[in-house]
Amino acid sequence: MSNRLTGTKGRILDLLKKNPKLSAAEFADYLHMTEMGVRKHLNTLIQDGFIDVENSKQAVGRPVQFFSLNTKSDELFPKNYGEMTVRFLSDIEESFGKEAIEKLFLNRKIRLLDEYQSHVIDRYDHEEKTSRLNVIQNTKGYMSQLEKVSEGSYVLTEYNCPIMEVARNFPIACARETELIKDFLGAEHVERTVCRAEGGAYCRFVIRFSQPSATRS
């Protein structure tokens, strides 16, 4: 799924996908617009971080600006990674059995746990660690939101699921994510009470710690 832009900005992106570098004059010719009109759209795309600009010195006259796509622009074009991943996993399950799938998701959880733990230090209390989890999940595109219910009790809500297609077809992905959160936090209890892969509008985790956070001097 993509966040496809439409209108003139969408046409500019399409042109750059087919032509690695273009000048404002070249855009104007393609789009039958004035250079000033094109530059307004280009400046917006630059500010949004989707295209880069570089100055190229000419033998005569002023340098010419050339525009190109950058890696962030990839998110604006259609992708089928989820569908392809599901097909690969289905082939693995058919060839090697359910145990192979379970092993793959367990390995993924272990790798992510190592990665998550690199973002915290030992002296972090429960609240700091849970807040850090929220930051990590947002960085990974989960659009998460953390609410402190009481001392040692939290609710984490994720409004987006970057692996939705996989989770719908392989529920073990959700189970391992719940385990990941519990293991990372060292919480007594983590329960997924709402799940997007099961038709919910979001994923929601209830988190409880057995001991209150230690007071640091």
Image: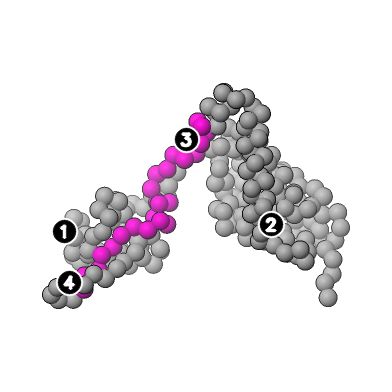
Q: Which residues are magenta?
A: 63-88
Q: Can residue 76 be seen at all in this image of the molecule?
A: yes
Secondary structure of the residue carrying numbered label 3: helix
Q: Earlier in the sequence, mark 4 or mark 2?
A: 4
Mark in the foreground, 1 or 2: 2
In this view, the residue in front, 187 or 120, is 120
- Disc 3 or disc 1, which is closer to the eye? 3
- Eye-nearest disc, 2 or 3: 2
Q: Which residue is mark 4?
A: 58
- Give the numbered dot on residue 117: 2
State the image coordinates of residue 8 (x, y, percent, origin top left). Answer: 28, 56
Q: Which is more N-terminal, label 3 or label 2? A: 3
* Residue at image mark 1: 29
Q: What separation in Å lies between label 3 and label 1 (alpha carbons)?
A: 38 Å
CB within 8 Å, label 4 to label 2: no
In which quadrant will I find the C terminus?
bottom right
Could you classify mark 2 by the number of other residues whose Cα lies within 10 Å: few (under 14), some (14-19), or many (20 or more)? some
Task: Kindly tell me whether residue 11 is visible in this rendering.
Answer: no
- Image spot of residue 11 (x, y percent): 28, 53
